[in-house]
Amino acid sequence: MAARSKVMQLFKALHRTRKEVFKGDDDALEAARQNINAEFRNNLTESSPEKITELLKFGTDVEIILRKTVIQGVHTDHNRIYAARPADRFQQLFVPFFYSPLSGINKKQWHH
């Protein structure tokens, strides 16, 4: 596959992952969009095949890390209780962690 095609494929994959991982968080969606676009724009004139391969590897690694490790926290009430909002890909493994600094209690609950 030509380098340009691989670059476009990675660009689209990063944006799809951004939309999935940060769904519902407009600030994070916009920051990630700007960051992805800026990184690709900064390397737009790169012509070295070795450097392009290195950048593609880095971008692919970033996409995998985002897809496999990011879980959003959601503020659940006025007592500063937070719950993780896992993406669909984590539903079967998910054990939410609740921490309330006011009560000093840490609880784990299973969601089915």
Image: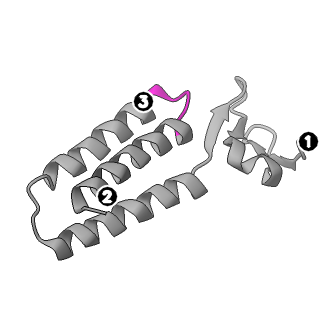
State the SS at label 1. Answer: loop
Q: Is residue 70 magenta?
A: no
The reply to whether the C-beta atoms of the residues labelled 3 and 2 are less than 8 Å apart is: no
Question: What's under tag 3, amino acid-wise?
Answer: Asp
The residue lying at 24 percent from left, 62 percent from top is: 3
Q: In what quadrant of the picture does the N terminus appear?
A: bottom left
Farthest residue, direction bottom: 50
Q: In what quadrant of the picture does the C terminus appear?
A: top right
Q: Which residues are magenta?
A: 22-26
Q: Dot 2 corresponds to which residue?
A: 6
Q: Dot 1 corresponds to which residue?
A: 112
The secondary structure that most of the magenta stretch takes on is: loop
The reply to whether the C-beta atoms of the residues labelled 2 and 1 are less than 8 Å apart is: no
Question: What's under tag 1, amino acid-wise?
Answer: His
- In the shown orientation, is residue 38 left or right of residue 109? left
Mark 1 / mark 3, whichever is N-terminal: 3
Label 2: few (<14), some or many (≥20) within 10 Å?
Answer: some
Q: Dot 3 corresponds to which residue?
A: 27
Disc 2 to disc 1, how far (Cα)?
39 Å
Nearer-the-camera pick, 20 or 7:
7
Question: What's under tag 2, amino acid-wise?
Answer: Lys
State the SS at label 3. Answer: helix
Disc 3 to disc 2, how far (Cα)?
28 Å
Dividing the picture into quadrants, the one containing residue 29 is top left
The residue lying at 73 percent from left, 34 percent from top is: 81
The reply to whether the C-beta atoms of the residues labelled 1 and 3 are less than 8 Å apart is: no
User: Which callout, 3 or 2, points to the residue nearer the camera?
Assistant: 2
User: Which callout, 1 or 3, points to the residue nearer the camera?
Assistant: 1
The residue lying at 37 percent from left, 41 percent from top is: 32
